[in-house]
Amino acid sequence: MKWQIPFIVSWILTVSHALAAGSGDVVLKHKDWSFNGPFGTLDKAAMQRGFQAYREICASCHSLDYIAFRNLADLGYNEAEIKAFAAEYEVQDGPNDEGEMFMRPGIAADRFPAPYPNEAAARAGNGGAYPPDLSLITKARANGPDYLYSLLTSYKDAPKGKNVPDGMYYNVAYPGNLIAMPQPIYGEDVTYTDGAPTDVSSIASDLVYFLTWTAEPSIEKRKRTGVKVMIFLLIMVGMSYGAMKFIWADVKKA
């Protein structure tokens, strides 16, 4: 039940942004993601790298409202690692016996704390722009994974004659080509523990894997279930057809 509300919100946002996508010359890069198709799977190593990139590059502005620290077990982290991640954050709790709210270290059951206390503070810290929550970003945009990858890798110098106001940046993957978010990735922004490449394209790809998981943590389970259901239905269709032929065999002879 806890994932149903985010998915409803995701669906509404997907429709609205699909309609908005026609408001500019959007150029998307298409990648053959491992999670595409009915047999697709998520790359855990890429997701772990994407989680690191999120923490070091994105978390100062963008929240993960629908993800709890304990959900990181899906990425292959053990209980001790998850507790360590959670303890790095301060979480508001309470009220205490005096009726006051207080701050405490995070625990596995907590969700990721937002970087700002409210929308007004978020806008004030970003020149009036509101950094969206990233939990559902790949579901809340048309062609979500390709859109996100393209957005992160498509900052360019504006062509001659194109006016870019102060506080805006030119990006060919964004509707209208003007975006308030500064370029977040320049290459070598993180140092991966597994020694994986850290160029702009590689970091962007890792972030896509991680945020595809946050948008639908059950994606692999859903696909496996879907394949099993299709196999079951095909078997039932074959059995039903065989039974029909057997039952009506005598009638056709008559």
Image: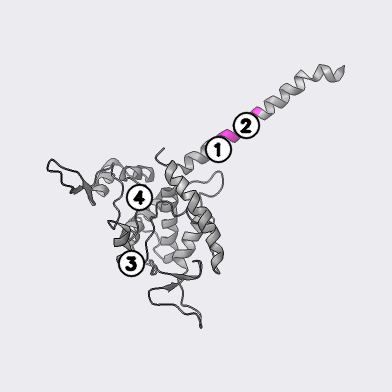
Secondary element under disc 1, as helix, strand or loop, is helix
Residue shown at 42% from the left, 66% from the top: 200
Q: Nearer the viewer, residue 193 or 94?
A: 94
Q: Reading the chain from its start, which is encountered first: label 4 or label 1?
A: 4
The residue at which mark 1 appears reads as 226
Answer with left or right where residue 85 lies relative to residue 30: left
Q: Earlier in the sequence, mark 2 or mark 1?
A: 1
Residue topped by disc 3:
126
Report how far apart the C-alphas of labels 2 and 1 lie in the structure.
10 Å
Q: Nearer the viewer, residue 76 or 177?
A: 177
Mark 2 or mark 4: name the one nearer the start of the chain. Answer: 4
Residue at image mark 4 = 65
What's the residue type where badge 1 is placed? Answer: Gly
Q: Magenta stretch? A: 226-236
User: Mark 3 or mark 1, which is nearer the start of the sequence?
Assistant: 3
Q: CA distance from mark 2 to mark 4?
A: 38 Å
What is the quadrant of residue 226 in the picture? top right
Frontmost residue, 23 versus 30: 23
Q: Is residue 230 magenta?
A: yes
Residue in the image at 33% along x and 67% along y:
126
- Mark 3 or mark 2, whichever is nearer to me: 3
The dominant secondary structure in magenta is helix
Q: Position of residue 8 (x, y in %)?
A: 47, 46
- For the residues marked 1 and 3, what is the alpha-carbon distance in whole angstroms? 42 Å
Residue 204 seen by the camera: yes
Mark 4 neighbour class, 10 Å CA radius: few under 14, some 14 to 19, many 20 or more: some
Label 2 sits on residue = 233
Please give left or right for residue 194 compared with residue 240 in the image: left
Residue 27 seen in this snapshot = no
Q: Disc 2, disc 4: CB below 8 Å?
A: no
**Proximity of marks 2 and 1: CB atoms separated by less than 8 Å:** no
Q: Residues within 10 Å of mark 3 (few under 14, many from 20)?
A: some
